[in-house]
Image (spheres, rainbow, N blue to C red):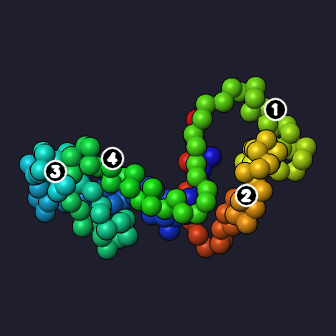
Amino acid sequence: MITLTKSGIQEAGLSDPRASAAVGQAIKQGKLPHPTTLRCADCGAIATNYDHHLGYAREHWLDVQPVCVRHNSARAWAPNMERSTSGFSAVLTRVPTWLLEELDRESTESNRSRNGQLIWILMQRYPEATAAHREEQGFRNRGPQLREEEAVYMCSVA
C-alpha cells in the first residue's frame, strides 16, 4: 500500500488526475488544441500528450507543453533521477508469497516493519557497506509521519 498526501503527489513525482482532467476539459472547450495537432517541444515529432512541465500545483494545471511518447516518458523519469540525493531509492521486485509470509512473520517477531526487516537483513549481509555508510543510515521503520490536517490518499498495489 502506498500512502500519499495531497502535497506529496508532486514530491513523489506522480501526476495529479485533477490537472489531467483540467487539460482534457480545456481541449474539449477549445482552449487548448489537441496534442496530436502539435509538434513535440523537445524533438519536433508529432506530439501525443501534454506535459505539466511546471508541476501539478493548481495554478499550473494548464501550463503544459506538447510532447511525444518518448519525451513524455523521459520527462517523467528525469525528476526522479535528480531527486535521488536522499540516499534511499525504491526497487520493485517480484517475491514469492511464501517468502513474504516468512518476512512478515520475522518482522512481527522483531517488532519491525517489513521495510525495516529487509534493511536489517541487508545490513547483516553487507556489513562492510553498512560500515562505510554509517552516517547515512537514518531511516524510520514506520514510514513518514503525517499531520492530521493532511488528506491521505490510499492506493492499493497488487
Label 2 sits on residue: 132
Work out whether mark 4 precedes mark 2 in sequence or the reverse, and give the earlier one. Answer: 4
Q: Which residue is nearer to you in this view: 24 or 65?
A: 65
Residue at the spot 36% in from the left edge and 59% down from the top edge: 18
Cα distance between the residues tagged 1 and 4: 36 Å
Query: Hey, which residue is sitting farthest left in the picture?
Result: 37
Q: Which residue is nearer to you in this view: 35 or 87?
A: 87
| Disc 4 packing (10 Å; few <14; some 14–19; many ≥20) | few
x and y, in percent, of residue 17 in the image: 38, 55
Nearest to viewer (mark 4 / mark 2)? 2
Which kind of residue does numbered mark 3 sit on? Cys
Which kind of residue does numbered mark 2 sit on? Ala
Which kind of residue does numbered mark 4 sit on? Ser
Which label is found at residue 43?
Answer: 3
* Residue 71 visible in the displayed image: yes
Residue at the spot 66% in from the left edge and 71% down from the top edge: 148
Label 4 sits on residue: 73
Q: Which residue is nearer to you in this view: 7 or 54?
A: 54
Q: Are marks 3 and 2 in contact (CB under 8 Å)?
A: no
Cα distance between the residues tagged 3 and 2: 43 Å
Which label is found at residue 102?
Answer: 1
Work out whether mark 1 precedes mark 4 in sequence or the reverse, and give the earlier one. Answer: 4
